[in-house]
Amino acid sequence: MNTNPVAIVTGGSRGVGAATATLLASKGWNVTVTCTSSIEDADSIVKECEALNAEALALSADVSDDEACKNTAQQTLK
């Protein structure tokens, strides 16, 4: 069982969100990266995080949508 801390980084496919996700991964965190536009960009950040030995997941999710937020949390817990 992995006991690393876990973060959900919204807007994690670019800019500050992407930098945050990769920084957390470099510090031993596992991350879920969400995006609303480019899942390909989010997948690229996930690959960077995995290269840093983190477990990482990319999801398309609109944080203004309650169901999308619940789904993000459920998928992250899996």
Image (spheres, rainbow, N blue to C red):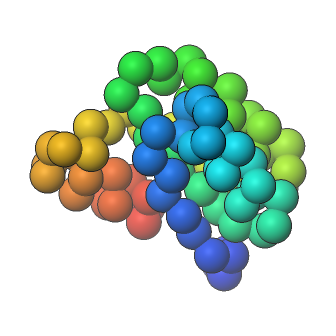
Query: Quick check: can you spot residue 43?
Result: no
Q: Please tell me in which quadrant of the rendered image residue 18 appears.
A: top right
> Which residue is depicted at the point 14% across and 49% down?
67
* Left or right of 5 on screen, residue 10: left
Quadrant into which the N terminus falls: bottom right
Q: What quarter of the picture does the C terminus occupy?
A: bottom left
Q: Is residue 26 above or below residue 64?
A: below
Q: Indicate left or right for 43 with 53 as reference.
A: left
Q: Is residue 43 above or below residue 57?
A: above
Residue 35 makes an appearance in the image:
yes
Q: Nearer the viewer, residue 33 or 2?
A: 33
Residue 46's spot in the image, x, y percent?
Answer: 66, 38
Up-down relation of residue 56 to residue 5 (above or below): above
Residue 61 spot, x, y in % from top left: 32, 37
Residue 14, position in %: x, y? 60, 30
x 60%, y 56%: residue: 31
Question: Quick check: 51 left or right of 40?
Answer: right
The residue that appears at 56% across and 32% down in the rendered structure is 13
Report the residue that reaches farthest toward the front.
16
Query: Where in the figure is residue 2, as x and y percent of width and height?
Result: 67, 75
Residue drawn at point x = 47 percent, y = 39 percent? 11
